Image (spheres, helix red, strand yellow):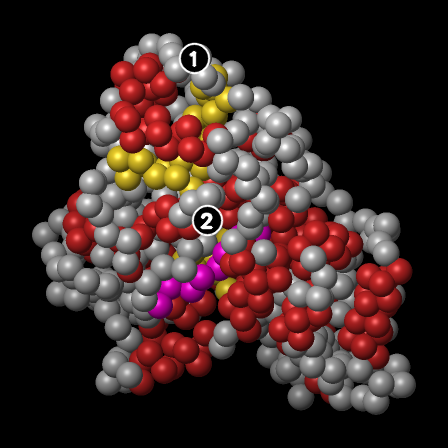
Amino acid sequence: MVSLRWTPSSPTLAPKPISRTFSQKRNLSFLVIGLFVLSFLLLSLNPNVQQNSLEHLDRLKEWSSDKAQSLAEGWSDDTMIGGTLKGWLADADANEHPKEKKECRGWNHTLSEDNDPPNCLKARQYRQTMRVLDREDKAEHDHWYFTLIHNRETLRNISMCFLPVSDPDWRLCHEKPLILSGWWYTAEVITGATTGEVIWQSSITKQLKMLGYSFIAVGPYLNWVEVAEMMPDVYHLIWNSDLDTVTCITDPRCIAKAHYVPPEDGEDLSVGVPDEERGVIPIWALGIVDYWGARPREMSNNKYWWGLTEDGPWSYHPLGQEWIATPWPLPGGHYHLPYSIEDYCLKMPIKSHEERENAALILAKRSSYFHYPHVSPPEFWTNLSQVPDFELLSTVEVEEGKPLPEGLVTMGKQSRENYTELVGSVKALVGMGAPPISPSIYTSLCQATPVVIPHFQEKYRMDGWWLYSSWSQHGPAIALGEPWVYKYYAHNYTDLETAVRKAMSTSIERYIPEDMKLTYTLSQLSKYLQRDLKLMFQDVRDNNAGKIPRLKKGARERCYELNRCKKPLEAGRIPNIPPVFPSKD
C-alpha cells in the first residue's frame, strides 16, 4: 500500500503594492447612465423583479463590442447584471420602503451575538464574515501575504450586505455573494501576473464583480479549509485546484461526514475518526477551476500523474466533469467558462499593415523551450533569423544552461502592456511549440496580427480531445485556419519559412472569437453561478443507485506517491465551525 506521505511546498512572491478602486464616479454616456439608474431602481424598490442575465446580455448585443466593453467598465460595484437580487427584503410593492424579513426583524448587529434572532440567516452571515475578517486582520494563520489587503476590503464590503435594511450602509446583494478561492492562480490576479491561467482568472474575477459577486483568495490548503468551515452560510461555492480538491474529498477530516466515500478499492480513512473530528465541507460546493481539464489517458500524461489504467473519459472530481470549469469548450461535461480579452485589447489602436515593422515576433517565454525534443531544432531558428527579407524578434528570458539558438537576440521580458503593443507592431506572431494553448494567440488576433502555429505530427487529428492534445501547440487556433492562423510542420524548415512569409504578407482585420466576447463570457458565467449545485449533486447520487460516486481507482494513492496532494488534516483537529447559541424562546 502506498503511504500517504507529503512534503511541503508553497509558492512565494516578493511584496508588491496592491490597490483597489471602488469609485462609482465613471464617465458614462447618457444611454449607459439611463440603463444604470433604471436597473438600480428596479432592484432597490421591487425585490420581485427578476433580473434575468440573458435579457441584459441581449441588450448588450445591440451595441458593438467596443461599446459593450465601455458599458461594462462603467458599472459601479452596486450594479448587477445577472441573477435575481432579493436581498433580505420581505415581499413588498414597488412603492413601499424596503422591509426586513420577519425572521430578521429587530436584529441589531451592534449587540452581542447571543441576542441575534436564531432564524435570521443574514445575522449568521454577518457574524461569520466578521469572524473571518478578524482572522484576516490578525494574520496569524498560514496565508499568502499579498492577499490580505484584498481579502480585508472584500469582507468589509460584503458585510454591508448583511446589515439591517434600515442601516444607511446596507446594500442589496445576492443571498450568498462570495466565492472562496484556494487556487493559486486566482490569488495571482491580485499581483498582476501574466500566465495563461492568471489572464483567464483576471477576466473571470472582473466578470464576477459585474455580476454582483466577490472573491477572496484564501490559500494555501489549510487556510481555505478553515475559512470554508467558518463561513458556511456566506460562500456561494469554493474554487480550487484538482489536487486540493482530491485531498479534501478523500480526507474524512475535511469533507462532510455524509459525503465521504473512499476511492475505488481504496482504504477507508474514516475508520476510527471520532465524529467531532469529521469534516463539514459539502462535496457539491467544491468546484475545480483548471486550465486543462480532466484529460483522458490516451492523449495526456495522466497515466503518470494520476495512475490511470484505462482510456476514455474520467474526472478527478467524483461527482463528474460538470464540477470542473475550464477556459476552453472541452469535450464531455466540463463547464466552459471562457475569458474575454476585449477589456484589454480593444484599448489598443490597430496599426495598418504598412505602418508595421517588417518583423515577426517569436512566441516564447523561456530559452529552455528551444531545447524541448518535440519542437523545431535550434538551427531552424538560426536559419530563419538570417533571412534578409524580415527581422526576427523575441522577448525570451534566457535561462542558465539553456542558450538561445545562434542568431537570435532577445528584447527581454516585457510588461503585459508593452508586449501587447509589440504584438500589434509586427506582421506576424510565430509559435515555436511552447507554451501550449497560450492566450497570446488571441491577443495577437485582436491586434490584427496573423499567427503561425506548429504541429508535431505530419498527420494529426483535430476531433474531440485531440484538438487540445500535444499534437500541436494550439489546436483551437489552428482550427481557425487562414488568413488568421497559418500552420507548419515543426520538423520541416521550408514549411516554417513559407508559413511565416504568408502570414507576414497578409493584412487582416481585428478578430475576436465569438466565445471570447464579453456578452458571451458574461452569459456563461451567469449560467454557471445560477446552477443549483445541491440539486445537481442529488441527481448524480440518484443516478448512481443512491450512492456518492467514488474517485477513480489509484488516483489518490498516486497523488500522494508523487507528493502532489496536500498533507491530510491532523488527528485531534476539530472543525472551526461557527458557534451556535440556544434559542431564547
Image disc number at residue 116: none
Quadrant for residue 59, please give it: bottom right
Quick one: label 2 or label 1, which is nearer the N terminus? 2
Q: Amino acid under label 1?
A: Pro
Q: Residues within 10 Å of mark 1 (few under 14, many from 20)?
A: few
Q: Secondary structure at mark 2?
A: loop
Residue at left 28%, top 60%?
464
> Bounds of the magenta span?
333-340
What is the number of the mark on residue 388? 1
Query: Residue 366: horizontal and vertical position, in percent?
Result: 39, 24
At label 2, counting other C-alpha atoms closer than 10 Å, the crowd grade (few under 14, some 14-19, many 20 or more) is: many
Which of these two is toward me, 300 or 512? 512
Above or below: residue 25 compared with residue 521? above
Main structural element of the magenta stretch: helix, strand or loop? loop
Residue sitting at x 38%, y 77%? 537
Residue wearing tag 2: 183
Residue 183 place in picture, x, y as percent:
46, 49
Nearer to me, 293 or 492: 492
Q: CA distance from mark 2 to mark 1?
A: 47 Å
Relative placement, left or right, of 213 versus 366 is: right
| Horizontal side of residue 2 vs 300, given as left or right | left
Question: Percent from the top left, x then y, of residue 388?
Answer: 43, 13
Q: Type of residue at label 2?
A: Trp
